[in-house]
Amino acid sequence: MFYIGQKVICIETAYNNTTLKGRIYTIADINECCEVNLYLVGITHNVGLCGCGVRLKGSPNSGKRFKPLDDYWSDNVLDKIIEQIEVGELVEV
Ligand SMILES: [Zn+2]
């Protein structure tokens, strides 16, 4: 679930490169049309269309291309750490 002020990580670079995969952004505002559209701090571009073709105010970004940072950490990083522990890749200190 997204909320204003939340940090999100881009999981798919925008076709116009305004948001890049792996970068972290902050949600400035949210618009819910047929899908969740996010307005991000510092990101402005000229594409104002929802995925369904409806024109939205400002510079919305499809919520599908972003994940809340907390979920991202728990889904990806923790899994990777656990994998590494299981295969014994962690160096003992
Ligand atoms: Zn829509």
Image (tube, helix red, strand yellow):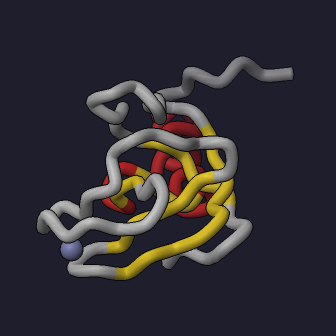
Residue 12 or residue 40, whichever sits in front? 40
Residue 82 visible in the current orientation: no
Relative height, residue 34 to residue 23 (above, below)? below
Q: How many marks?
A: 0
Indicate the quadrant where residue 31 lies.
Answer: bottom left
Relative height, residue 33 to residue 90 (above, below)? below
Indicate the quadrant where residue 62 lies.
Answer: bottom left
Relative height, residue 1 to residue 67 (above, below)? below
The residue lying furthest to the right in this view is: 93
Residue 62 or residue 76, whichever sits in front? 62
Q: In this view, does 38 lie to the left or right of 63?
A: right
- Residue, x 46% and y 31% (percent of image)? 18
Residue 49 or residue 33, whichever sits in front? 49
Residue 25 or residue 11, whichever sits in front? 25
- Residue, x 27% and y 74% (percent of image)? 35
- Residue, x 51% and y 32% (percent of image)? 22
Residue 65: give x, y in percent of width and height. Answer: 35, 50
Residue 81: give x, y in percent of width and height. Answer: 58, 39
Where's ligand 1: which quadrant? bottom left
